Image (cartoon, rainbow, N blue to C red):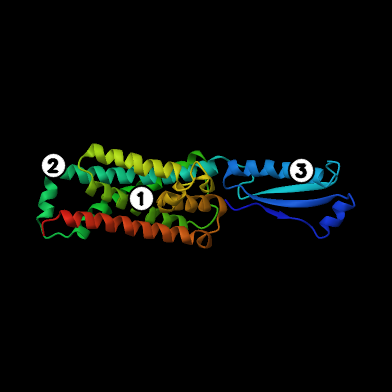
Amino acid sequence: MPKPQLLSPPGFNTQVENEKSSPIQVLIDATDTNNARVVNNIIQATTKAFLRSQKIQPSPDKIIPRIRIWFNPGRKESLYIVPGVYALILWVYPSLLVAIAMVREKEQGTMLQVYASDLRATELLLGKGLAYLIVAIGQSFCIMLIGAVIWGLQLAGSALPLILGTLIFTADAVAFGLLIGVKASNQNAAIQVVSLIGFLTALLLSGFIYPLNNIPFPLSLVSNIVPARYYIEITRDAYVRGTGWAGIWFSLSMLAILGLLLFNTARLGLKKMQLN
């Protein structure tokens, strides 16, 4: 979350020294409502501490902080929680479906025919992934419709960044599922890996529950390669800030890079298993 901005008028020091009232303005980004409340309380306490340090009798007439909450003035929890839930759902379920489907074919022995065929690893993964990508896109439409109907979420800016970000993110989730499906030996193992690696990282290291600044080292380094982190930034920008392309271009780029890495890793793993 961006740091709060403190704006003081010209001649602030002179007015304080002469014990005259002086308004100041504090601008707080309330995308994260919990942090906004904490910052609000800190500003109030800091103002009183400053008055005491300057040996000025605390009074509402001396320094008047005028606090403005950006983006989410009503501090609605749904604007913070629901966009994060989108990322969690769209990361776990598509990847779980793909991983189980891939492993099931291994257990049934049908994958051996593919290994012995002329079908390349890239073609197989693209064919498998495309089907589940369509399912994931349908799922994203459903949960966003539910968010709009039940919690009243409305876009704060253009829908195009959100649409593109959702498409790339769901492709990342499918690529992650393909990777797990290639590596796992049975369905139980695939479910456990998706639950432990996919769900826990998306829940704890994406900024959904804990602010990224509060994640301790070295887990903070791991958060840089968690796709859900960047998709949460895109969804919160779409529903809360509304800055558009200028605010989320880096997140889109990181999603594209991480998706390519996941798919290429799955391709290399499957290529080694093929006979030709």
Question: Residue at position x 14%, y 49% from top?
Answer: 111
Left or right for 45, reference 83: right
Q: Position of residue 227 (x, y in %)?
A: 40, 52
Q: Amino acid at mark 2?
A: Gln
Element type at mark 2: helix
The tag earlier along the polypeptide, 2 or 1, is: 2
Element type at mark 1: helix
Q: Which residue is denoted by mark 3 in the rendering?
A: 49
**As rendered, which of 104 and 139 lies closer to the eye?**
104
Question: Residue at position x 71%, y 54% from top?
Answer: 6
Q: Position of residue 93 (x, y in %)?
A: 34, 42
In which quadrant of the rendered image does the C terminus lie?
Answer: bottom left
Q: Which residue is denoted by mark 2 in the rendering?
A: 108
Q: Which residue is denoted by mark 1 in the rendering?
A: 137
Q: Amino acid at mark 1?
A: Ile
Residue 186 in sight: yes
Residue 134 in sight: no
